[in-house]
Image (cartoon, rainbow, N blue to C red):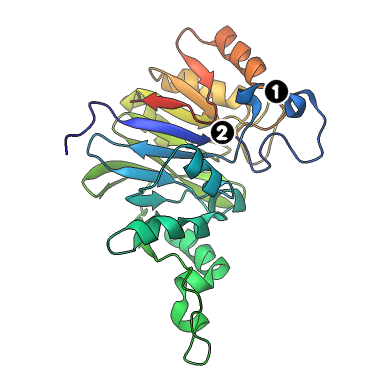
Amino acid sequence: MNGLKQNNITILGSGTSTGTPIIGCHCKTCLSDHPYDQRLRASIFLKTKHNHHILVDATPDLRFQLLRQKIFHIDFVIISHEHADHIHGIDDLRQICFKKTDHELEIYCAQFHQTHLVERFPYIFQRDKFFSKNRPILGGGIPILKLKTLDLKDEINQIEIANEPFTFFLLPHNYTKTVCFYHDGLAYLPDCHEITDQVLDFLTLQKPRLLIINCLQKEDHQTHLTVEKSFAYIHKIRPESAGLIHMNHNLSHAELTRLAKENFDFPVFPVYDTQNLTY
């Protein structure tokens, strides 16, 4: 099979943990009928030049996200961190497993994130302990997921997965750390509240073709980048283009688009659900 000339990225979800609209909220963004203000939980899907289909995070919206984009094959999954909005759709991967020849799907994540996955989904990751001769598996509706550890001992970690060259790095987010990465011109920085100096220097040197960076809201926040911080990092890194992701309902698509146009002389824009980009 011939590969693509460029890598392709699909935005499966562009919103924060609540999604937009928020249940019961009557703010302007939540009441907006503009499709770009309808945000599922943040996730992306990569189709690489080497014909690999890669899912990043398994949100609670995963079933709908995969159906909407007609995604029926995934080669492997990367989990950024253990928060509910990034892993609580993991059971929906069962249908992907059933379609694979060996019925097994590899899940790549940091060692300390694996601990949380095993604790929350013991029926998937601890079958021998969860089931027994007297308590057998009934029905068979369980995904076969194989945890693969990302060796993240250093600040900057070059790791190859299925002949795909990745550079992984951990960034601080609340009481945990998020697995972020650089892949063939794409820098993906979902949930974080700062970028460490060494990672910032690395990204500035790489000058990504596309930087996707979290941008929660205008107001200060303890666990996420804000408009001010995201914009400052984008100015420092100077990618060819930058997409803003993981917005909450305090930022409409129109407002964030306006702010980006006022602050940059190169393409910077809020991404939206179902958007396709290349790098």
Which residue ends up furthest to the bottom in the rendered image? 134
Residue 267, how many percent across, how many down?
Answer: 46, 13
Residue 104 or residue 261, whichever sits in front: 104
Q: Amino acid at mark 2?
A: Ser
Residue in the image at 68% along x and 34% along y: 20
Residue in the image at 36% along x and 44% along y: 54
Query: In this figure, which residue is indicated by the disc labeled 1?
Result: 33
Q: Amino acid at mark 1?
A: Asp
Which residue ends up furthest to the front in the rendered image? 139
Mark 2 or mark 1: name the one nearer the start of the chain: 2
Q: Secondary structure at mark 1?
A: loop
Query: In this figure, which residue is indicated by the disc labeled 2?
Result: 14
Residue 265 or residue 246, whichever sits in front: 246
Residue 64, how many percent across, how many down?
Answer: 55, 44
Residue 233, how many percent across, how many down?
Answer: 50, 25
Left or right: where does residue 217 sit relative to residue 261?
A: right
Q: Secondary structure at mark 2?
A: loop
